[in-house]
Image (cartoon, rainbow, N blue to C red):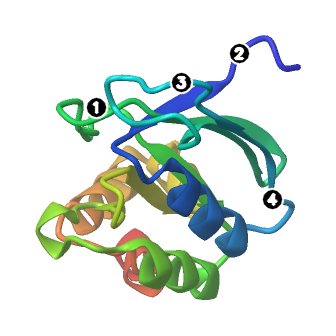
Amino acid sequence: MEPISTCLWFDGVAEQAADFYVELFPDSRIDEVMHAPVDYPAGKAGDALLVTFTLAGRRYLGLNGGSGVPFTEAISLSIDCADQAEVDHYWNALSAYPEHEQCGWLKDRFGVSWQVVPRMLPRLLADPDRAKAGRVMTAMMTMKKIDIAALEQAAD
């Protein structure tokens, strides 16, 4: 068992969310579904209570904790993408609320916030040529989904 795991609080859809995520990401699987032994405030005996799953080799917990605790953008899961095709793949699969899209961030149908980040972006933002980095940052701030070609053009 890992000493620290990320636990995501869902309102009855932890198993559906985990199923969706493990289908989307390589090296992913459902590890265990724990069913409630008795009725509890957010469900009844036999309901999926806790789903342990692995995404891209990292362990997560999905807890069906009930309503009233929505996800916010204050925490997000970040996807390191090799190229534009990978950015497009994850963006198209995850994006569910266009009004919550900004600078490579999106919200999925379960309310979880994601950052879909091309690997080259942090490198460009950390470029020692601060004017170049500034142009990249300015271009990124106008985007919803990150466009690698547009960032490279801004860098040049």
Residue plotted at (62% across, 26% down): 37
Provide the secondary structure element on which disc 4 rests: loop
Provide the secondary structure element on which disc 2 rests: loop
Nearer the camera: disc 3 or disc 2: 3
- Gap between marks 2 and 1 measured at Cα: 19 Å
Name the residue at the left extreme: 99
Residue under circle 1? 74
Q: Residues within 10 Å of mark 2 (few under 14, many from 20)?
A: few
Nearer the camera: disc 3 or disc 1: 3
Nearer the camera: disc 4 or disc 3: 3
Question: Looking at the figure, which quarter contains the N terminus?
Answer: top right
Nearer the N terminus, badge 4 or badge 3? 4
Provide the secondary structure element on which disc 3 rests: loop
Residue 86 appears in which quarter of the rendering?
bottom right
Nearer the N terminus, badge 3 or badge 1? 3
- Gap between marks 4 and 3 measured at Cα: 30 Å
Nearer the N terminus, badge 1 or badge 4? 4
Residue plotted at (53% across, 62% down): 16
- Mark 1–mark 4 contact, CB under 8 Å? no
Nearer the N terminus, badge 4 or badge 2? 2
Q: Residues within 10 Å of mark 1 (few under 14, many from 20)?
A: few
- Mark 2–mark 1 contact, CB under 8 Å? no
Residue under circle 3? 38
Residue under circle 2? 4
Residue 118 appears in which quarter of the rendering?
bottom right
- Amino acid type at circle 4 is Ser
Residue under circle 4? 28
- Mark 4–mark 3 contact, CB under 8 Å? no
- Amino acid type at circle 1 is Ala
Could you tell whether 37 is left or right of 122 in the image? Answer: right
Q: Is residue 46 above or below residue 38?
A: below
